[in-house]
Image: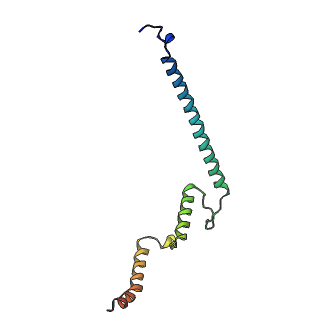
Amino acid sequence: MSDDCCASCDTHARDTATAEAAALRRRQLWLVASSAVAMGAGALLFWHFTSRFANDPAGQKRTLAFAWSAIKWERLADLGAVITEKKDRGPKALAALVKSEIARLTPILKAASGN
């Protein structure tokens, strides 16, 4: 192969054009991705400063974790779940709940079984 190969063939010209097209495509994708991130950040900031929740405790910071928690608890409430207070959560509270439910349901189950 001689040094004047590039002058007589289109292979290297096509490779250069392909590389330039790939670089242009990467820049376009970067612009699209960065604009999507900017719009998402703008929406998050708007939500952060304007949102209010029905059960929003005073002084609760509006963060993404708070939003997730609020959505989760609202969805559970929509499904009929009873949401216990923080003081009523934990091993001792659970043991007391189980004990009270056993005491409440034992007569019903005994009457249903015929014993």
Q: Position of residue 34 (x, y in %)?
A: 59, 40
Query: In the depicted view, which residue is nearer to us: 18 or 110?
Result: 18
Rendered position, 61 above or below 23:
below
Indicate the quadrant where residue 57 lies: bottom right
Q: Is 85 on the left-hand or right-hand side of 39?
A: left
Rendered position, 94 above or below 48:
below
Residue at x 43% of width, y 7% of height: 2
Query: In the depicted view, which residue is nearer to us: 20 or 8?
Result: 8
Q: Is 111 on the left-hand or right-hand side of 80?
A: left
Residue at x 56% of width, y 67% of height: 74
Residue at x 49% of width, y 13% of height: 9
**Number of dots carrying numbers:** 0
Q: Position of residue 16 (x, y in %)?
A: 52, 21
Q: Position of residue 113 (x, y in %)?
A: 33, 89
Residue at x 46% of width, y 71% of height: 89
Query: In the depicted view, which residue is nearer to us: 100 or 23?
Result: 23
Give the quarter of the figure containing the N terminus: top left
Q: Position of residue 38 (x, y in %)?
A: 62, 43
Query: In the depicted view, which residue is nearer to us: 104 or 80?
Result: 80
Give the quarter of the figure containing the C terminus: bottom left
